[in-house]
Amino acid sequence: MAKRPDGALEHDIMAVLWAADGPLQPSDVKDRLEVALAYTSVATVLSRLQVKGLVTRIESGRAFAYQAAIDEAQLATRRIGDVLSTVTDREAVLAGFVRSLSKKDAKALRSLLDGPRH
């Protein structure tokens, strides 16, 4: 079996929570994942996501249920910020990122940068 990229399981679990109508227990998350995992693995990842502030945990009977605390755009923004905070040459990283954008994404970024400031 090929190794999954770092953070792929966390993202898959977040995607399940984003798609849910309400809080889910670990067994519900496990059943909705496209990969076969042990209940304990799902529960461990959910606990780690809760510590990171990405999910909230509420009591649900004798167990806990989890729901996303942030949406996908907020998570991506947080990850970009995390990457930028670890490099010494932020300008070089940002320049490389901008050069890697598709024309459509570059146009959207330009529109955001040129737009009104609040």
Image (tube, rainbow, N blue to C red):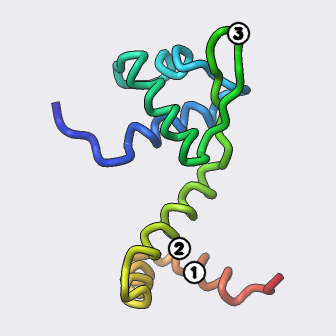
Q: Label 1's element? A: helix
Q: Judge left or right: residue 10 versus residue 6.
A: right
Q: Is residue 64 left or right of residue 10?
A: right
Position of 60 with respect to 2 (left or right) is right
- Say whether disc 3 or disc 2 marks the residue closer to the N-terminus: 3
In the rendered image, the residue lying farthest to the top is 62
Q: CA distance from mark 1 to mark 3?
A: 50 Å
Circle 3 packing at 10 Å, graded few (<14), some (14-19), many (20+), is few
Residue 60 on image: x %, y %:
70, 15
* Residue that mark 2 sits on: 104
Instruction: Give the residue type that dot 2 points to.
Output: Lys
Q: Position of residue 12 (x, y in %)?
A: 46, 36
Which of pointers 1 and 3 indicates the residue nearer the eye?
3
Q: What numbered label is drawn on residue 107?
A: 1
* Amino acid type of the residue tagged 1 in the rendering: Lys
Q: Which residue is mark 3?
A: 61
Verify CB contact (< 8 Å) between mark 2 and mark 1. yes
> Crowdedness of circle 2 by 10 Å Cα count: few (<14), some, many (20+)?
few
Q: Looking at the rendering, which quadrant does residue 33 occupy?
A: top left
Residue located farthest toward the right when viewing the structure as drawn:
118
**Marks 2/1: CA–CA distance:** 5 Å
Depth check: 102 or 90 in front? 90
Query: Residue farthest to the left?
Result: 1
Name the residue: 52% across, 40% down. Answer: 49
Percent position of residue 25, x then y: 60, 18
Q: Residue at x 37, y 88 (%)?
A: 89
Q: From the viewer's perspective, is residue 108 above or below residue 62?
A: below
Q: Earlier in the sequence, mark 1 or mark 3?
A: 3
- Quadrant of the image for the C terminus? bottom right
* Residue at image point 67% right, 44% down: 69
Q: Secondary structure at mark 2?
A: helix
